[in-house]
Image (cartoon, rainbow, N blue to C red):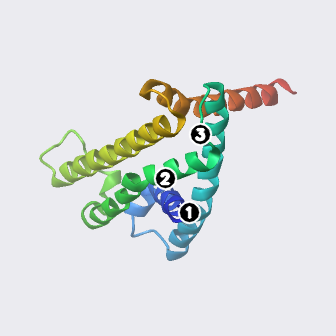
Amino acid sequence: MTSLLVLNGITNALDRNNLLLTNHKSISTVFLIVVLIIGGIFGPLLGNAYAASLNWTGDWLNGKAKTDQFLTVIAWSTIPYVFSLVLLIPKLLFLDDGLFRIDMSDLTNPKSVIYIVIAFFELALFIWSLVILVKGIALIQKFSYGKAILNVVLPVLVLIILIIIIFGIIYLIP
């Protein structure tokens, strides 16, 4: 389970640095190693934090699951998203540094078509991961799918509200 969270963290890190990675003429090996290490460390940390927050907000909805059950669901739901790492290969081979210069209105350009196809597969894998997460939460919490979606969204809303409050306080203090 931890290995899935590590892979998810690495996938997230590579995804967040996608533009730098596809411009592989200017990327250094050290940068890539740092991205992999940071992603590998933060994957399990963020997975555990999200599991705890799902447990906390799930209690508000009278859920039945425990944090370790959420962590298992989170880990398994990452498999399709982690598979999107495979799509980095065609990005590096076919797009090169062209991501910065692709004209998406010109669908006769092969790079535009490749970019759209890869983006479609990435979106499909992300949605598949999200569906597994929602179905898993519905199962362990004994929720309907609607309530499970609410359980998935609530921790994010709580985090957004906390960030707004913190920044509000910071900007109110002279």
Q: Which residue is mark 1?
A: 2
Q: Which residue is mark 3?
A: 65
Please name the amino acid that badge 1 sits on: Thr
The residues tagged by marks 1 and 2 sit, at their Cα atoms, a distance apart of: 21 Å
Nearest to N terminus: mark 3 or mark 2: 2
Observer-nearest of 170 and 136: 136
Instruction: Check if mark 3's residue and mark 2's residue have beta carbons within 8 Å.
Output: no
Instruction: Check if mark 1's residue and mark 2's residue have beta carbons within 8 Å.
Output: no
Residue 57, above or below 117: above
Please name the amino acid that badge 2 sits on: Arg
- Callout 3: SS: loop
Q: Residue furthest toward the bottom?
A: 29
- Callout 1: SS: helix
Please name the amino acid that badge 3 sits on: Ala
Nearest to N terminus: mark 3 or mark 1: 1
Nearest to N terminus: mark 1 or mark 2: 1
| Comparing labels 3 and 1, the label whose residue is closer to the camera | 3
Quarter the C terminus occupies: top right
Q: Residue sitting at 36 percent across and 53 percent down?
A: 80
The residues tagged by marks 3 and 2 sit, at their Cα atoms, a distance apart of: 31 Å
